[in-house]
Image (cartoon, grey):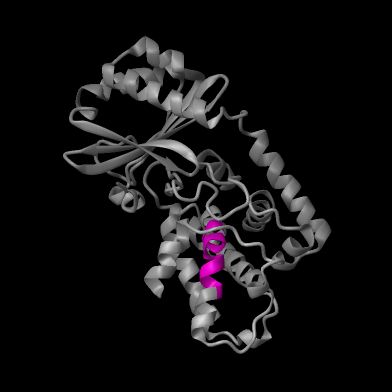
Amino acid sequence: MVSTLRDMARTGANVEESTDPDLASVGPEDLEQAAVIFTRVRPRLFGIAYRMLSSATEAEDLVQEVWLRWQNYDRTTVTNPAAFLATTTTRLSINALQSARVRRETYIGPWLPEPVDTSADPYLGAERGNALEVAVLILMEKLSPNERAAYVLREAFDYPYPQIADILRSSEAAARQMVSRARRRVTGERRTPVTVTEQRRLLTAFISAARSGDLAALEQLFAADVTSYSDGNGAVRVSRRPVVGAVRVAKFLMAVADWFWVGVDVQWLSTNGEASALLRRDGTVFAVLTVDASAEGIGQLLWVFNPAKIAALSVTD
């Protein structure tokens, strides 16, 4: 049962909490029935936890904790299992996020969200893919845990404000204010992103130009203030500082091109609802790359080298 529940993290249909008769109420069912209910809502629970923690690994662990609590809870007292499980997930995520931020203070070099495969579920358990792109997750790091929770519940899962207020133990007015404040901070600090098709085109063009060492082509793809972030947590030959500016980024890429792209195979996949490149050398995945772009060009190059963050994607066919 545990392996089945884990497999549900990125698959399954969305759950309408108030309309599914099997989820509307719960009686004295046995553990198997509890598992059936949990499995149905698990994609949503994982989607909430991942958007809160920016880590698929930590989200998996947290959802497993929710499952343990659910199977040991007096379920005869729960009138809406889906709402109960979402509330438990959100509150545990708030606590986990506070601890995670303390751990990240010792991280070596830029910290980036752990990419998650969205090929099977492009919205990752939500009604829409909001608050899922890596660039948005990075911006959400600036929010307080409660603001982040309110934003995730509203923007990705379309929870009504009274329910958000109940989950966060606040007033409806406070919940509205948190969502509004979070929305301003996230959207106000990001240029309007290009379409999914254009993002894929720019990523493809970037890899082609980088591999061929075409300096002029690289500079034409970049926004003036483009930034290259490399998440390696101290790995050898991984930049520990962001590289900023079209000319500097292009020259940096040219300087490493002679060795970086040798023997590299590129596999395309969808992570966080966007096109990404899985980079392999000698059959081993060593990096995942994606870009964030606007009408001005590529604004961010996002390289994840940390083996712990790309282990799950390493087995992608």
Could you tell whether 143 is left or right of 307 in the image?
Answer: right
| The quadrant where residue 13 appears | bottom right
Give the total of numbered labels: 0
Residue 317 in the image: x percent, y percent?
29, 46
Say above or below: 242 vs 308: above
In this rendered view, identify the residue nearer to me: 108 or 194. 194
Check the image and name the residue furthest to the right: 173
Say above or below: 269 vs 114: above
Residue 241 in the image: x percent, y percent?
39, 34
Say above or below: 44 vs 69: above
Q: Quadrant of the N terminus?
A: bottom left
Q: Main secondary structure of the magenta part?
A: helix
Residue appearing at x 43%, y 45% in the figure? 111
Residue 111 drawn in magenta: no
Check the image and name the residue furthest to the front: 21
In this rendered view, identify the residue nearer to me: 105 or 310. 310
Check the image and name the residue furthest to the top: 216
Residue appearing at x 51%, y 25% in the figure? 198
Say above or below: 267 vs 245: below
Residue 40 drawn in magenta: yes
Residue 98 in the image: x percent, y percent?
55, 61
Residue 301 in the image: x percent, y percent?
43, 31
State which region is magenta. Answer: 37-47
Residue appearing at x 49%, y 50% in the figure? 121
